[in-house]
Every structure is written in C-alpha cells, then in structure tokens.
Amino acid sequence: MVSLLDLPEVQSAVAPLITGLVCGLLLYRWAPRWAGLSLVTGFMTTALLVNGVTIEPLTGTRKIILAVMAATVAAAVIDASPLRPVVRRTVLVIIALSAFFWMAFRVLAHKEGIIFWLYSAGGVVYIAWLVLALDAMRHNSGALASTAVALGIGTSITAILGASALLGQLAAGMAAGGGALWLLLLRYHEHPVGNVTSFAAALSCGLLGMGGILFAQLPWQVPGVLALMPLIRFLPRVRELPYWQRASLYMLAAGVITGSAIFAAWLIIEEPAGPY
C-alpha cells in the first residue's frame, strides 16, 4: 500500500500547507516578526518529503534546496541588521546570483559563445528582478503573499509541462507555504514580513524557473510572463479597501498572470509531459 506521504498531492500541497499554517500560527503568537517563515516551512516540507535528507549526488535540484535554506538564514541575519536599503538589496542580489551560478555551473560549462551569454544574462536578469521586486513588497504583505502563491503555482505547472515533475513539486510546496501565509494574513491583516519571506520566495521561484529552462524543456518566454507578477502591487486604489478585499484582488490579478504563463507554456511546448 502506498503511504499517504508518498502521494505527490500530499507532498506538494497538503503537507506544506498544514506545516506552514502550524508554523505561522505559532510564530504569530510568540515571534510575529518571523511569521513569514511559514512560507519557507512549506517549501522545506516538500523538499524533505520529495528528496529526503540526502545531498549526494549534489544535483542541480539539491543545490536549489540548499541555496534556499542558506538564503533563509542569510535573510534572517539581514533582517536583524541595521543595513541601509541600498546595501541590503545589493547583498541580497549578490547572494541570489551566486546561488544561480552555483546551481547552473555544470550546464553553463557546456554552453559556448552567444548561447552561454544568453543563458547567463537571462538568469541574472530574471533572478535579480524577482529579488528586487519582491523586496519592494515587504511592507505590502497581501501583495507579497499573493505573488508568492501565484508565482509558485505558475512555476510549478509550467515546470511539469516542461518535463520536470521534481522542480514542479518543489515550486508547489513553496506556493502552499505562501498560501498558508496568505490565509494567516486574512486573520492578522497587514503585517510586515521582512526579507525572510520576500527573499525566500524570489530565490526559490527564480532558481526553479531557471532550472526548468536549463535542466528541462521550459521555454524562456514563460519566466518572462511570470516576471510580470510583482507588478500587481501597483493596482490602483486597492490600498483603500478592507484587507480581505485587497488580498483577494491581488490574488485575482496574480492568477491572471499565472494563467497566461501556463497557457504560453502549453502553446509553445509541442508535447506537454505528464506529471510523473
């Protein structure tokens, strides 16, 4: 009999949502400053169920998991440090791009000429943009949580269409953790969540999206569409609404972008792969 925890649906959605909610509830009670860790908890729950605790051989996917873990610690230290905004953002971008090149090194080493530079520049632009754009949303937690959920779902489904179920599961786990945070914010309303949330969401989705391009068959156009996600924070007159309406509108707008990315992937990929 297949264990319940062996089911992809449980690994990628149910388990990370539950652990994210439990973590978030405890942190909101005892350390509300760190409640955004509920998102990271969801991602790490899926990573543990899918990958286990082994890191050998050190594949690109396992590098992503380790990078998100290390980045969460780094973001927590940065949150607790009195750094100027420019310095803080510069450090976050440097960490993120270092993680990207560490993850992509083996693939990029086999690229030559203009192909190498296109892959490298694309990864730099996409990941740096996500880091900076989500950092700008730290004090708009409703928009940030909605972006994390929709970005994770879009990355997950398009990665699966691009023939990488593992990357898709990890992105779904991040989306479920973001969903836990989104639900918690409906109760606790507007609450700054810091770099622990924004950086973890940006780095995980950025690395998973680029991993889909480098390790599977994800078209480059898909991250281009998903990169529009942080722009939902500019929705006019939304901040005047009650929190639950504001969060719902942010989620609806983010969902439209997610649907567009999935549709683009479906059109471009000739033979969409199954989830297994």
Image: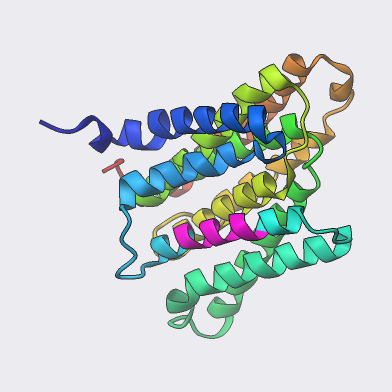
User: Residue 181 colored magenta?
Assistant: no
Q: Looking at this view, is 155 or 47 the one in front?
A: 47
**At which x and y percent is residue 191?**
77, 31
Picture residue at 40% right of the left edge, 43% below the top = 46
Q: Position of residue 77 (x, y in %)?
A: 70, 58
Disc tally is: 0
Relative side of 238 to 141, left or right: right
Q: Is residue 19 above or below residue 49?
A: above
| Scheme by which the image is coloured | rainbow
Residue 99 placement: quadrant = bottom right
As drawn, the residue found furthest toward the front would be 30
Does 250 appear above or below 228? above
* Residue shown at the point (40%, 60%) measured from the top left: 61
* Image coords of residue 80 (percent x, y): 76, 54
User: From where the camera sits, is residue 158 visible?
Assistant: no
Q: Residue furthest bottom?
A: 113
Q: Quarter of the image containing the N terminus?
A: top left
Q: Answer whether residue 70 is magenta in the image.
A: yes
Residue at the extreme left: 1
Which residue is found at the position 58% from the left and 80% from the top?
114
In the rendered view of the protein, which quadrant contains the C terminus? Answer: top left
Q: In terms of depth relative to the viewer, which is nearer, 240 or 267?
A: 240
The main secondary structure of the magenta stretch is helix
| Residue 91, quarter of picture | bottom right
Is residue 174 depicted above or below 254 in this figure? below
Image location (x, y in percent) of residue 144: 71, 37
Residue 209 seen anywhere in this rendered image of the structure: yes
Point out the stretch of residues depicted in magenta: 65-74
Q: Which of the pair 197/77 is nearer the observer?
A: 77
Tell me if 4 is positioned left or right of 156 in this view: left
